[in-house]
Amino acid sequence: MCTGCVRCAHGGRAMVNAAPWLHIVGIGEDGMDGLTPATRAVVEAADVIIGGDRHHTLSVNPTATRIAWPSPFDAMIETLQTLKGQRAVVLVTGDPLWFSVGARIGRTIPAGELVYHPQLSAFQLAAARMGWSLADVETLTVHGRPVQQMIAFIQPDQRLIVLTTGADTPAQIAKFLAERGFGKSKMTVLAAMGGENELRFDGAANGWSHTVPAFNTLCIDCIAAPDAALLPRVPGLADALFVSDGTMTKQEVRAATLAKLMPMRGALLWDIGTGSGSVAIEWMRAARYARAIGIEPRADRRAMAAQNALALGAPKLELIDGTVPQALENLDAPDAVFIGGGLSRETFDAAFAALRPLGRLVANAVTLESEAELIALHEIHGGDLVKIQTHRAEPVGRLTGWRPSMPVTQWSLIKR
């Protein structure tokens, strides 16, 4: 008899989920005392408990087998899969589904086999300590990730709560703030929140000198000086913010290009002929967890793109040395494609074939030959074909006149 199904009311068989065997338990500095009675019972009855040293210290179960966090994290999934049939508990800090391992585990273990036990998150505790409404705060993590990711969120009057990587992270972030004209921003580091040894450190970014515990949460009240750098997440950053050899998609055209590419949460962009990386970087800044792969055959331009990505808060920009269309093989399927260089019929065909349904493709051309290719592609595939040109006011002797930029022909379409 099949044990994975039951007889339904109509005489057929209906599949049922296996009984939950894995519990992801959030635990705070108050340890077992902070758990609900039901969650405490789960921990006390576990056959196996997985967690960091801190988690094991906070939990009580003298008979359970204790396993430390495996490394790399994929080894955790392999370890968990060997525990099926036992009562297993994974201990995490705070809310298992808020910048924690719960979501990663849930992508591998079927939902019917999992139970989540949330605890107050560091964000909730920090907001309560600061008297801030979480609805009005940007919640970020740089734990185990490039610290530069937070740069994109430095805005006047913005409040940030950041899960840090270690004791050095607040000082690194203080430096970012000061360099961008936000040195007067108020910073608070909170450690061991909810425990007997809770600590708090306050100061300004431009004078930050505290030595703080390795496990901490950082709160920032961003205060801009009159000369602060304004780096909105809406596309169209000033050209001067990018290191470039001059061959880059300029500010106004870049804003129009990103509008057609439509950055979305977690979406992937292929930036073909990435140059200084301006389009890819603005794509990543415009939406949470947006990803970008820049394809650029010149090493000097890849170096500029990497430098720009670090400075502007997109440190996870992936850069590939190669020429198209060959370099496009074996890449993850994109949600959007920008062709700023290397335009050819072969490149378009390869990119469009790889593009996911509802994917957006934008190609810009400044030469007559590239424009002719775009016109031909437009006749075959449709889409929108526009010409963009800007004029800037510049001195003409003692007076002022309009200096035109080179016109850009832009073709865009959505894959249906």
Image: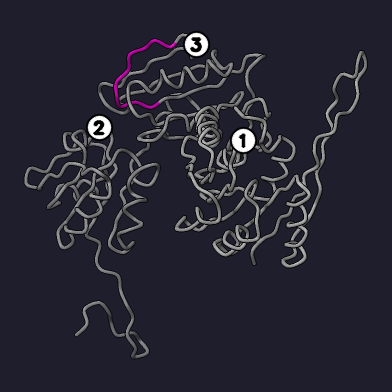
**Relative to the observer, which residue lies in front, 212 or 190?**
212
The residue drawn where x is 51% and y is 29% is 307
The residue drawn where x is 65% and y is 46% is 340
Q: Mark 2 points at which residue?
A: 30
> In the picture shown, does residue 34 fall above or below 181?
below
Residue 414's quadrant in the figure? bottom right
What type is the residue that disc 2 sits on? Asp
Give me the C-alpha separation between circle 1 and circle 3.
Answer: 24 Å
Considering every residue shown, the one lying at the far left of the view is 63
Crowd class of label 3 (few under 14; some 14 to 19; many from 20; radius 10 Å): many
Name the quarter where the N terminus is drawn: bottom left
- State which tag comes first along the sequence, 2 or 3: 2
What type is the residue that disc 1 sits on? Arg
Instruction: Indicate left or right for 410 with 166 as reference.
Output: right
Q: Specify the segment rendered in magenta.
A: 208-217
Task: Specify whether residue 216 is painted magenta.
Answer: yes
Q: What element carries label 1?
A: loop
- State which tag comes first along the sequence, 1 or 3: 3
Q: Name the residue under label 1.
A: 233
Q: Is mark 2 on a helix, strand or loop?
A: loop
Instruction: Tell me where residue 315 appears, x and y as whole percent.
Output: 47, 34
Mark linked to residue 206: 3
Q: Is mark 3 on a helix, strand or loop?
A: helix
Residue 94's quadrant in the figure? top left
